[in-house]
Structures are given as structure tokens and as C-alpha cells.
């Protein structure tokens, strides 16, 4: 697990804005991740996953997935997984950055019959602007065409800007905002449980609907390059830290944004 990326993987990531890494977790590691994350999700929800189909919450977007943010702050077991320096090294090597901080972690769980995730980019929602941000997406269940695997517009990481866009009911709304995306065929990325997908923070991506009666669980961790500066948006920053900042300030709060890897 967690070997350094190959030359081919690195080249694919830098050209296309993502790379699929089969078998990043072995059987025992996958079991440990599932156990830690399921327990953290159950504690946060006040109940375990109960098999209820999506659609019982009002509106389209609330029925896209269960989103459990910052589980590493409420679960020692999840924190131990997310703070693994080997994950940071892999990401930093792909993105060619010296140091890497955790921006946030989150479980993204598509319930049975969940809606699709509209195409979007990640960085425009965050508190820093960067073309070096990278996210880790780990399949805890097989992610298939039927249950909501990722879809990515390859090469789109350089075709948009940092303006915030809505993630609404219109799956392809982002293309209207950025005509340069027209003609890019989204690529499905089916993944087996234990596989990882590393995603550029500016690449356009979404996920299909879950057309099955099973769950599609995934755990993600978003990374910020060390040295990034505050852009005025709060996002996951605590209220106290947010109000202490002025746009242009260095984001270096180790308690909220832990540095998990630095080259050398």
C-alpha cells in the first residue's frame, strides 16, 4: 500500500487531472477503513446506515449523498487514517508540491436511489485559490456505472477560473458558464472497493446516480498545498480562525490544517 506513484500515473494525473490507483488498500486495510468510517458516520448521525432510499429529504441536492464532513475531528480512528504521511507523500508527488496540509476530509455516501452529483470543481468553494490542490477519493464499496461512480472531464483543470458555481439539479450547468468545456467527453471511473482516485482540485467532475438498492460508500480527503493564502471565503474554517484572517494571510494553523507531509 501507498507506494510512490509510477511515472505513468504521475504523467496521467498531470495531463488529465486525475489518476485511478487500483488496489491502494489491501483486504485488511479496507476492512479497517470501513470499520473506522462506518463507526464515525454512525456516531455523527446518531444511527447506522439504515437502508432507507434517498428521496426522503426535501429537494434534489439533499438526496445526492450523505456528506459527513471532518470525521477526523470526531474520530480518533479516522484521524489516524487521514493523517498518514504516506497518503500525503503520494498526493504531493502527483501534484509536484513541497508540502501538503489536510484541508478537509469527508465521507460521501450515495444511498440507494440517490441523485447524480452535478459536474463541479472543488477549489472555488475553498478558502484559498490554487492550481496545486489535490483530493484523494477512496472507494469503500465497488463504485460502478449503476451505483454512482465518478465521472471526470479530462484536461478540464486548466479551462476554468476560481469563480464559485452552483451544484444544483442541472448536471451540466457548468458547461454553460465555461464554453471551453464543450466537446469534452466525461470519462467514467469505475473503481473496486479499496481503489483510490486522485483528483486535481480544479478538474471538472461529478458522479452518477445510484440506481441500485445498495450503498456506494467513499471516503475523501482534500489537500491544500503548504503556503496557500486566504482568499476571504470561510468554508470549513472555524469561526475564530476565520475572523482572525485577512485576505492574503498565510493559512498555517496546524490545529485546523495539519501539515502531514513535507518533501525531504
Image: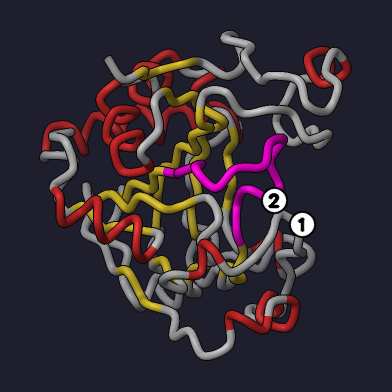
Residue 252 position in % (x across, y down): 62, 14
The prevailing secondary structure element of the residues shown in magenta is loop
Classify 179 as above or below 3: below
Pointer 2 with pointer 1, Cβ within 8 A: yes
Residue at 75% x, 77% y is 177
| Colouring used for the render | secondary structure
Relative to 189, 228 lies left or right: right
The label shown at residue 124 is: 2
- Which residue bears the numbered disc 1? 164
Q: Is residue 213 visible?
A: no
Classify the position of the C terminus by image quarter.
Answer: top left
Provide the residue span drawn in magenta: 121-135
Residue 132 is a magenta residue = yes
Q: Which is more toward the observer, 197 or 194?
A: 197
Relative to 169, 75 lies left or right: left
Residue 234 is a magenta residue = no
Q: What is the C-alpha distance between the residues marked 2 and 1?
A: 5 Å
| Neighbourhood count class around disc 2 (C-alpha, 10 Å): few under 14, some 14–19, many 20 upward | some
Residue at 78% x, 35% y is 231
Q: Residue furthest toward the bottom?
A: 183
Residue 202 position in % (x across, y down): 55, 56
Say which label, 2 or 1, has the lower sequence index: 2
Amino acid at each position: 500500500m501507498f507506494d510512490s506513484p509510477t511515472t505513468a500515473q504521475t504523467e496521467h494525473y498531470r495531463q488529465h487531472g486525475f489518476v485511478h490507483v487500483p488496489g491502494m488498500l489491501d483486504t485488511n486495510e479496507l476492512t479497517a477503513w470501513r470499520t473506522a468510517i462506518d463507526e464515525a458516520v454512525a456516531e455523527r448521525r446518531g444511527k447506522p446506515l439504515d437502508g432507507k432510499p434517498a428521496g426522503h429529504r426535501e429537494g434534489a441536492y439533499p438526496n445526492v449523498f450523505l456528506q459527513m464532513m471532518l470525521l477526523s475531528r470526531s474520530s480518533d480512528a479516522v484521524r489516524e487514517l487521514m493523517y498518514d504521511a504516506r497518503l500525503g507523500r503520494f498526493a504531493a508527488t502527483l501534484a509536484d508540491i513541497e508540502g501538503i496540509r489536510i484541508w478537509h476530509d469527508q465521507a460521501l455516501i450515495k444511498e440507494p436511489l440517490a441523485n447524480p452529483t452535478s459536474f463541479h470543481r472543488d477549489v472555488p468553494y475553498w478558502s484559498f485559490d490554487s492550481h496545486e490542490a489535490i483530493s484523494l477519493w477512496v472507494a469503500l464499496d465497488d463504485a460502478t456505472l449503476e451505483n454512482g461512480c465518478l465521472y471526470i472531464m479530462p484536461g478540464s483543470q486548466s479551462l476554468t477560473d476560481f469563480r464559485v458555481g452552483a451544484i444544483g439539479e442541472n448536471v451540466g450547468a457548468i458547461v454553460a458558464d465555461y464554453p471551453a468545456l464543450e466537446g469534452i467527453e466525461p470519462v467514467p471511473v469505475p473503481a473496486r472497493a479499496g481503489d483510490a482516485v486522485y483528483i486535481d482540485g480544479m478538474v471538472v467532475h461529478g458522479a452518477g446516480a445510484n440506481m441500485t438498492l445498495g450503498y456506494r460508500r467513499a471516503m475523501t480527503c482534500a489537500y491544500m498545498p503548504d503556503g496557500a493564502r486566504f482568499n476571504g471565503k470561510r468554508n470549513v474554517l472555524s469561526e475564530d480562525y476565520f475572523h482572525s484572517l485577512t485576505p492574503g494571510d498565510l493559512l498555517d494553523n496546524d490545529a485546523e490544517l495539519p501539515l502531514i507531509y513535507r518533501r525531504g
